Structure formats: structure tokens, C-alpha cells
Image (cartoon, coloured by chain):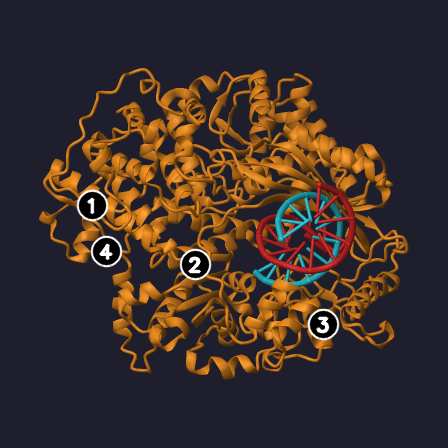
Chain colours: A orange, B cyan, C red
DNA sequence: ATCCTCCCCTAC
DNA sequence: TAAGGTAGGGGAGGAT
């Protein structure tokens, strides 16, 4: 688990404890460097200073300026005796970090607007008891444990802050405090919190299971991206699992890749009833019992809210469902009888009236007919002794992280599906290990179980579909191998609705066409399916019901949209409240866009409006009830992530719809047609970069502020480096003539590359690289034949290609590989020259990373022409290596 | 044909 | 009480 600390550069993966540790370390460094001292003079808080994103903010004006500059919502998320850290991360993220206190945006903005000096007392008055997050303050000295939560992530002892405050305030103020907070408290008991409340969004997101599920899923997709990008990964731990496997001494029949379709081994891995398993770690007494994770405690009767008409509302749901099926299947509505999940819900005040959703339930509960997403009321009817446990999103994250890191030890050929589920291409890994699939599965599942305390299931097949179906078969806590000899008979009896991509509607439709299983659907022609289900869906089903799946695993993902929506607790009195909420939601969206470093061109507003005949009071408390949904979008001339633009557009769209704010039940904002903030749209081949020199310059200036002050890269004329002629000219391969032969050295523009230092960027990049000595020792490499790469500060000289900062070079390369075009000679030339320059500058560590990056990418492309490019470039590199070091670069084959 | 917008569907 | 989010793929139908 060393990876947690090693592999967490500041890479946008904020919702993580590891990130926090890095952040803390950074802040402490600043603090000890004396920055903290001047903060004590801060006029923002009495004796307390504020950091925003790691910068010290000495005055309200400066904070205001920073907020204007960076946008977003600022939250105070950590407090000690000496300092407070504020951040513009979304506060759901902040809360996720097992942090402490969240200062609500309104409080800060109000105070700043009013040009007031903030003080801590105000904050105490402002907050109300319900929105108050856990207190988790640190202190120096005497330990007064106020909190039980998350000692793990917070190494600091705790102080009781309220006491400290009352010491310094007089009695009058103290009693004021009490009055105000008890008033707020009282108010909260009387009136349910709705989206009108300024705290609503953060509190809602903090409690929303679906929100957490999707955010975490996105996090892990990004995590896999980052791991693949940042690592010149060496699989040290592969040998460990091999040892384990050998010690298992398992003599069962050994499966290898030849037993699977296409000679590929695709693994699908999924935690078993994830939320429950994690929850049971702390509650061993509940093991073996029917358990469900839900907000509701279950069993308590509630008083009936006036105006609720469950019968009418449920009938509306049902009718709508029937209508869809009828339309899809061409059967008259009267002939359709369907089951919905509202069927066994009774009135609100009855024993089985709870409409709290079950996020996850144990296999014991499933045995009684309970399933995920079911309402608590219905579940209690099926199983009155159902045990409920609360959510613990922190824990889920920790387990998910362990899961991902465990797999990533062995291979990075991972496609993240969600926080508890992924596809892994094990073909190469198992070749390398030379162990059987079954042994690997056993050892891996055992490792995960021992590390997380939670069971998981794995399925193996020759493609992703087979792997996935195998997992379903394997559950719970098992493994299953869909080998090519059993695929056909297995798939024949698979239920159509168990196919990924076949949901409620599609399976109803297929049923109406007379098919329930894959075997039955195999008799249907492709044309027929495409006619009834559409071109793509039809084709997909045609393949799926035969166990085929042409879609390869996708390791690298690109985000295509950013959105935030709230379909709970939306109850407006007037347009002012509605627009105020739109403003807050825009801030949330903007905040997420900043996190993902994207801007968007197309803004879509989604509105859920109470349907005409639906009861005004919804069956589910604060739910959206039966609604009509409207989606409207505007496309801007240029991409934006500016909160005022977004707000303006959504309010304008909203006004155009001319909807009574009282009827609104849900609101969402989505940004599509995204562009990355960092990368200018680099889509085509590399030589675009030559044409657009200005954009290169802009990029450079943008990055200048990150460099240390003594950085003179822009000013100094670089020493002209003589290109070392390789001792051996590369042979000419196929279509690609060696560019060196023609040009002798790099193109003129490349001489602009300054041999400057940009150490902090580079050091950041170098963090967490494994020690190469160990790797090569493991592999039994003879040292003297190769240069063993070791990061050394003095080696790091070069800034990058054409003045591009180093990390842009990889993006550039990636754009090149992804361009889908034939590699061009000038580009190959450029890359070779750049890499040779790296050798000359003795910048081998990064060269090694770059070479590995190139090799991995080219392997993904898997095209002969690119392999030739690779061979050529590597040869150039090795020639230069021999010239400079008299040795070759060690390249891990 | 190809694109765009608005929807629907699916997955977790 | 309850916390019904979010991203991606794709189809229908109109505009070009």
C-alpha cells in the first residue's frame, strides 16, 4: 500500500485522503517556512489566518480578488489553532476528505460583499446545528477528544473549540450565541429544508448515494488515466503474487489463454454487495443476517403529510410505464400488466410506508426477494427483521482505493467501470507470470479479501461480455471461467435482461417480440433486430446473444460532459428563489469544471416540472413526484467555464420556458462540447505545433508563474548543443527513411529549447517513481550492459520540446498517436531529435519515462507502421546513448 | 448524407 | 420523513 503516498501527485484526483495528505504536507511546509507567522496578523479572523488553495490571504480584499480570479465556492475545511484552509473545491469533495468544518458559501460571500471583516464568532452564529459538519480540530498539547471520526487521516490531536471561544467572549455575547443557534435549531425542526436554503446543495450532495456513486466512479476512471500516464510502471509485485500462487500448490485443472475465445483473458471484477460488505466490517455481529444500507432506520411510522396522494401518484407512474411498453411492443394498454417498485408501498403512516431507497442489500436479504433500489417499505414487508446500516462514503472510498491499487500492482490494462467494478486484460500479465487463470483468480481474490475485508467476485472470458456474464455466475464471493468450450451452451440460456445494455425497456420490447433468452434471440435475423431496436442497438444485441463482443477495453477515458442536478427538495415560492438556486447550481457546475480543467460550449438546462395531474405534495418526502422533463440547450460561440456566463444562460433559458416556480421539482445544468483548459485542441499531427507558434508561447507564459523565481529560462540564451552523431547510422526501415540522414540534427526551431531548469515542475513529476535498481535486480538484468536510470537533480536540465513544458510533450505525443493519421517524417524526426537531446542533456530519467510512454501507446495502436516508428526512434536513442554514455538505455521488454 | 437538438435508455 | 446523480450512447426527426 505504499502506493497511496507515492502515487498521489496533485493530479486532480481531489476527492481523496491521499490528496489531503499531500496538501497538508504542502501547507505545513509553507507554515514552517514562516508564512504562517505573518498570517497571525490576518484581519479576517481574530488570530486565525486563511489559506485559499494553499495561498495565504491576509485581507478580505485579497480574498475577494482571488475568488473573482478563481471563481467557485470557497470553503474553510480545516482549522487548527493557527490556521484555516479554504478551498474552491466543491464542498461535497471537501466533506469527502474526512474533514472538519465546512463554512457555507453564503456566509463568506455575504461577508465579503458587505466588506466586513470576518470573525470566527460570526461563523459560529451563522452555522446551524443541522448543517454542522463534524468538528475535528487539532490542538497543540492537551488532547481533548471531541471526535471519533477519521483519526486515521488526521494525525493531529483534537481541541474543543467552543470552549476556547467562550473563554474569549463575554457573557452577553455567549448568551446571544445560544439564543441564535437554538432559534435556528427550532426553525429546522419545524420546516423541512428545501433548495431555498443556502446550505441545501452541499448538504444534499453530502447525503446523496447516487451522487457519491457517480463521483467516485469518475474519480477512478481518472485515477486509471493518471496511473497510465504518469508511470513508467515496473511490475515489481508480480513476482510476489507468483510466489503466493506457487505456494497454493493447487493441482486443479489449469486454464490458460488457449482456453478462451481469441486467446484473450479478460477479467471482470466486482465487489459483492459493496456498501453492505464495507458496512459489515465494523459490524461483524450482523454477518449472515439480512442487511440493507439505507438512510431510513426502518420500522418507525410517520405522521401523514397533508396533500399526499400516493394512490394517484403511483397510478401515474404505472400508467406511464404501461404506455411505454404498449408503444414499444404494439400491444393495447389494457392487456399489459406490469410490476413496479411502488406496488407494495402502503400509505405513509403505515408500517410499510417508508420510501427510503435501499442502496445495497446482503445476499441473505436478496434471498427474501429484496433488491437494490427497492423502497424500504416494500423490503420490510418481505423481511420484517431486515437490519439497516447507515452509509459511510469515506469507507467505501478507502476500500475502492485498495481494490484499484491491488489490481494496479499487476497491470494497468484496467478499464474502470465504477468504484467497485472494473475490466482487466490479463492476457499479458498471465503470460508474464506463467501461471494459470484459476490460480491467479484465487490468489487475487484472497489478496483483496484480506486487504479490504470484503468479498469480491471475478469472471473470466475471451471478451468483456463473457467476463461480465461470468462474474454474474460467480457471485457471491466466487470466480467463474467462461472458457471457449462452454461459451455457446452457457450463453444459450442467459436471460436477455442480464445482458449489459439491456434494461427495462429493451427487455420489455424483446419480450413482446417473443424472446426472453439469448438462445431464443439467436434465431432472429440481424435486419429484424435492427428494424425494431435501431441500427446500433440491434447489431449489438445480435452480437451479444451469441457471446460476441467486438468492443475492446478502453483504458484511457475522455470526459465529454460535466453536469450537476438536484431533483430533491426543490420547492420554490417565487422566481427569485428559483434564480438564486440556478446561480448556486451554476457555481457547483463551474467548480466541477475547474476540477476537471475543462470548458464547455453547450449549456443545457434540465427542468423537472410537476405533471398536470400529479398531486402537489409528493409521495416521497421532498421527492420530485410524477414529473414532465424539459431539456433546453444553448450553444455558445466559444467554450466557457465562467460562472456568470453559465448563470446568465441558464436563467435566460429558464425564463423562456415560462414555468411557475412553484411547480418545479428538479433542476440540472449540463455542459457539453468540452475543451480542455490545458491543452489547446491538439487533435492533428504534431506539425500543427510548428504553425501555431503563438499558442506555444501563450502556453509558456501561462506556466511561468509556477516556476521558481530564479528560473531564467525565458531570458537566457541556451548554449547551443552539438548533436552527437550516432556512431552507427540506423538502418532504413520500410517507408521511414531515417530523418537523421537528411537533416543531420534537429530542425532549426528546436534550438530554441533552453537548457533551463524547471525543477519544481519536474520534481513534482518525479515523485513516486520506483527505484530502478530494484526492478532490474528483480529481473536479473546485468547492470554493466545498461545505464540504470536514477533520478538525479542535476540530470534534469531540459525544459521540453520547442519550449513546451515537459508535461506538454507527452500530451503532444499522445495527440500525435491519437491523430489517427499516418506518422509523418518530420514528426518522427522531431521526436528522435528531442529524445537525443535528452540523452545529451543527461536527462535520462525522463527520457525513460517518455520512451515507455511511447511504447505503451504504440502497443495500443498495434499498427506495423507505428512499430516501425518506435523501432526507429529507439534506435536513435540508443545510438545517442552509446555516444554519450557508451552504454544503452535499459528498456524493459 | 450529415448534423443538431431533444429526448430516451442504461449503468453504477 | 429523505437525501430520485451523472455520464455516455443512441434514436427520432427536423435543418442543412
Residue at 60% over, 26% down:
A120
Q: Nearer the viewer, residue A85 or A607?
A: A607
Q: Is residue A702 above or below residue A814?
A: above
* Mark 1 vs mark 2, CA separation in Å: 39 Å
Dot 1 or dot 2, earlier in sequence: 2
Q: Nearer the viewer, mark 3 or mark 1?
A: 1
In the drawing, what numbered circle is on residue A875?
1
Q: Nearer the viewer, residue A19 or A160?
A: A19
- Quadrant where the C terminus of chain A sits is bottom left
Q: Is residue B4 above or below residue A742?
A: below
Residue at 42% over, 79% down:
A484
Q: How many marks?
A: 4
Mark 3 in CB contact with mark 2 (< 8 angstroms) = no
Q: Nearer the viewer, mark 1 or mark 4?
A: 1
Dot 4 or dot 3, earlier in sequence: 3
Which of the 4 image quarters holds residue A273? bottom right
The residue where tag 4 is placed is A893
Amino acid at each position: 500500500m505504499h502506493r497511496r503516498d507515492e502515487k498521489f501527485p496533485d493530479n486532480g484526483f481531489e476527492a481523496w485522503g491521499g490528496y489531503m495528505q499531500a496538501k497538508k504536507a504542502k501547507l505545513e511546509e509553507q507554515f514552517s517556512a514562516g508564512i504562517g507567522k505573518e498570517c497571525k496578523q490576518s484581519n479576517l479572523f481574530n488570530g486565525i489566518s486563511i489559506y485559499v488553495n494553499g495561498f495565504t490571504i491576509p485581507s478580505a480584499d485579497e480574498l475577494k480578488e482571488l475568488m473573482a480570479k478563481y471563481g467557485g465556492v470557497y470553503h474553510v475545511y480545516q482549522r487548527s489553532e493557527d490556521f484555516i484552509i479554504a478551498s474552491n473545491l466543491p464542498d461535497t469533495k471537501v466533506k469527502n476528505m474526512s474533514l472538519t468544518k465546512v463554512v457555507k458559501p453564503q456566509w463568506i460571500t455575504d461577508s465579503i460583499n458587505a466588506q466586513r471583516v470576518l470573525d470566527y464568532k460570526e461563523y459560529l452564529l451563522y452555522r446551524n446545528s443541522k448543517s454542522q459538519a463534524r468538528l475535528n480540530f487539532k490542538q497543540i498539547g492537551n488532547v481533548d477528544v471531541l471526535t471519533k471520526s477519521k483519526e486515521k487521516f488526521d494525525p493531529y490531536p483534537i481541541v474543543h473549540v467552543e470552549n476556547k471561544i467562550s473563554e474569549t467572549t463575554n457573557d452577553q455575547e455567549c448568551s446571544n450565541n445560544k439564543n441564535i443557534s437554538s432559534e435556528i435549531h427550532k426553525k429546522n425542526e419545524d420546516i423541512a429544508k428545501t433548495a431555498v436554503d443556502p446550505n441545501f446543495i452541499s448538504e444534499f450532495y453530502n447525503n446523496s448515494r447516487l451522487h457519491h456513486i457517480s463521483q467516485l466512479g469518475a474519480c477512478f476512471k481518472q485515477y486509471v488515466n493518471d496511473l497510465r500516464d504518469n508511470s513508467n510502471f515496473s511490475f515489481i509485485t508480480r513476482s510476489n503474487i507468483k510466489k503466493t500462487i506457487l505456494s497454493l500448490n493447487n493441482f486443479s485443472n489449469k486454464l490458460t489463454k488457449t482456453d478462451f475465445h481469441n486467446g484473450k483473458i479478460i477479467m471482470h471484477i466486482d465487489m459483492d454487495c459493496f456498501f453492505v460488505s464495507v458496512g459489515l466490517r465494523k459490524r461483524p455481529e450482523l454477518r449472515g443476517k439480512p442487511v440493507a444500507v439505507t438512510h431510513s432506520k426502518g420500522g418507525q411510522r410517520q405522521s401523514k403529510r397533508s396533500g399526499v396522494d400516493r394512490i394517484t401518484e403511483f397510478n401515474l407512474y404505472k400508467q406511464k410505464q404501461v404506455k411505454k411498453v404498449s408503444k414499444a411492443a404494439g400491444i393495447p394498454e389494457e392487456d399489459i400488466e406490469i410490476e413496479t417498485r411502488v406496488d407494495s408501498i402502503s400509505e405513509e403512516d403505515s408500517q410499510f410506508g417508508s420510501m427510503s431507497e435501499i442502496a445495497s442489500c446482503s445476499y441473505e436479504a436478496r434471498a427474501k426477494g429484496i433488491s437494490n433500489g427497492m423502497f424500504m417499505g416494500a423490503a420490510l414487508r418481505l423481511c420484517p427483521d431486515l437490519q439497516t446500516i447507515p452509509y459511510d462514503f469515506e469507507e467505501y472510498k478507502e476500500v475502492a482505493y485498495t481494490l484499484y491499487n491491488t489490481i494496479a500492482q499487476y497491470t494497468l490494462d484496467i478499464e474502470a467501470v465504477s468504484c467497485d467494478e472494473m475490466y482487466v486484460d490479463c492476457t499479458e500479465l498471465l503470460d508474464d507470470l506463467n501461471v494459470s487463470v484459476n490460480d491467479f483468480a484465487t490468489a487475487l481474490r484472497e489478496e483483496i479479501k484480506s486487504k479490504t475485508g470484503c468479498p469480491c467476485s471475478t469472471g473470466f472470458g475471451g471478451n468483456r461480455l463473457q467476463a461480465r456474464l461470468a462474474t454474474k455466475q460467480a457471485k457471491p464471493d466466487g470466480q467463474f471461467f467462461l472458457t471457449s468450450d462452454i461459451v455457446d451452451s452457457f450463453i444459450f440460456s442467459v436471460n436477455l435482461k442480464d445482458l449489459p445494455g439491456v434494461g427495462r425497456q429493451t427487455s420489455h420490447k424483446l419480450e413482446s417480440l417473443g424472446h426472453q433468452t439469448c438462445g431464443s434471440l439467436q434465431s432472429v435475423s440481424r435486419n429484424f433486430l435492427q428494424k425494431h431496436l435501431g441500427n446500433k442497438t440491434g447489431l449489438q444485441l445480435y452480437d451479444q446473444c451469441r457471446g460476441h463482443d467486438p468492443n475492446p477495453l478502453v483504458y484511457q477515458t475522455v470526459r465529454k460532459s460535466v453536469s450537476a442536478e438536484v431533483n430533491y427538495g426543490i420547492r420554490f415560492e417565487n422566481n427569485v428563489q428559483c434564480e438564486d438556486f440556478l446561480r448556486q447550481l451554476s457555481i457547483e457546475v463551474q467548480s466541477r469544471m475547474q476540477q476537471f480543467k475543462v470548458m464547455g460550449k453547450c449549456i443545457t438546462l434540465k427542468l423537472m416540472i410537476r405533471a398536470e395531474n400529479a398531486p402537489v405534495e409528493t409521495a416521497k418526502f421532498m421527492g420530485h413526484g410524477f414529473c414532465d422533463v424539459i431539456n433546453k440547450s444553448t450553444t455558445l460561440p466559444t467554450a466557457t467555464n465562467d460562472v456568470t456566463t453559465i448563470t446568465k444562460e441558464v436563467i435566460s433559458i429558464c425564463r423562456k420556458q415560462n414555468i411557475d416556480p412553484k411547480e418545479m421539482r428538479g433542476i440540472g445544468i449540463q455542459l457539453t462540447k468540452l475543451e480542455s483548459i490545458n491543452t489547446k485542441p491538439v487533435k492533428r499531427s504534431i506539425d500543427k505545433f510548428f504553425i501555431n507558434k503563438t499558442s506555444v508561447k501563450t502556453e509558456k507564459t501561462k506556466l511561468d508563474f509556477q516556476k521558481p523565481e530564479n528560473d531564467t529560462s525565458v531570458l537566457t540564451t541556451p548554449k547551443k548543443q552539438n548533436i552527437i552523431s550516432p556512431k552507427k547510422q540506423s538502418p532504413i526501415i520500410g517507408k521511414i527513411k531515417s530523418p537523421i540522414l537528411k537533416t543531420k540534427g534537429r530542425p532549426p526551431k528546436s534550438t530554441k529549447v533552453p537548457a533551463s531548469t524547471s525543477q519544481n515542475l519536474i520534481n513534482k513529476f518525479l515523485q513516486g517513481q520506483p527505484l530502478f535498481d530494484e526492478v532490474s535486480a528483480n529481473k536479473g538484468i546485468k547492470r554493466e550492459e545498461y545505464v540504470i536510470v536514477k533520478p538525479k537533480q542535476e540530470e534534469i536540465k531540459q525544459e521540453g520540446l520547442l519550449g513546451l513544458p515537459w508535461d506538454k510533450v507527452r500530451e503532444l505525443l499522445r495527440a500525435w498517436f491519437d491523430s489517427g493519421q499516418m506518422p509523418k517524417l518530420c514528426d518522427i524526426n522531431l521526436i528522435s531529435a528531442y529524445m537525443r537531446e535528452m540523452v545529451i542533456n543527461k536527462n535520462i530519467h525522463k527520457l525513460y519515462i517518455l520512451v515507455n510512454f511511447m511504447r505503451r501507446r504504440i502497443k495500443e495502436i498495434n499498427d506495423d507502421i507505428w512499430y516501425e516508428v518506435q523501432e526507429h526512434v529507439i534506435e536513435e536513442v540508443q545510438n545517442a546513448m552509446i555516444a554519450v554514455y557508451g552504454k544503452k538505455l535499459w528498456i524493459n521488454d
